[in-house]
Image: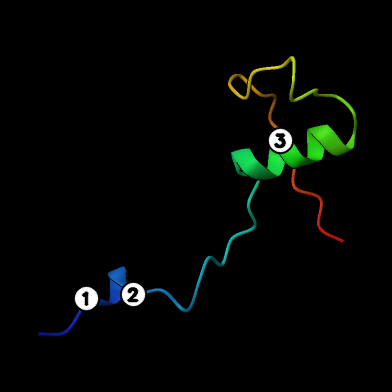
Amino acid sequence: MSMDRSLKTKGNLTEKRSVMKREERIAKLVADKKMDMAKDAPTGLPKTKVIES
């Protein structure tokens, strides 16, 4: 049985992501010195836009 055309995709994600994953956000916030891993909790993080260069 074949898959319906509406369910098929051409490769991986074709759309640009608008926000980062939790691990990426934590790494960026620590690099920007906006978060201290010793004091701040990893929950309730602000959303960080993905900037691709």
Q: CA distance from mark 2 to mark 1?
A: 7 Å
Q: CA distance from mark 3 to mark 2?
A: 33 Å
Q: CA distance from mark 1 to mark 3?
A: 39 Å
Give the residue type that dot 2 points to: Lys
Which residue position holds label 1?
4
Residue contact at pointers 2 and 1, CB within 8 angstroms = yes
Residue found at x 53% / y 65%: 13
Q: Which quadrant of the rendered structure holds the C terminus?
A: bottom right
Relative image position of residue 41 (x, y in whole percent): 64, 18
Residue found at x 61% / y 38%: 22
- Please identify the quarter of the rendering in which residue 8 is found: bottom left
Q: Observer-nearest residue: 46 or 34? A: 34
Q: Residues within 10 Å of mark 3 (few under 14, many from 20)?
A: many
Residue reaching furthest to the front: 38
- Looking at the image, can residue 16 be seen? yes
Disc number placed over residue 8 in the picture, else none: 2
Which residue position holds label 3?
26
Relative image position of residue 48 (x, y in whole percent): 74, 35
From this view, report whether residue 24 is shown above or below residue 29: below
User: Could you tell me which secondary element the residue under label 2 belongs to?
Assistant: loop
Q: Observer-nearest residue: 3 or 42? A: 42
Give the residue type that dot 3 points to: Ile
Which of disc 3 and disc 1 is earlier in sequence?
A: 1
The answer to whether 11 appears left or right of 5 in the picture is right
Residue contact at pointers 3 and 2, CB within 8 angstroms = no
Which of disc 2 and disc 3 is earlier in sequence?
A: 2
The answer to whether 18 appears left or right of 27 in the picture is left
- Looking at the image, can residue 20 be seen? no
Relative image position of residue 36 (x, y in whole percent): 80, 22
User: Could you tell me which secondary element the residue under label 3 belongs to?
Assistant: helix
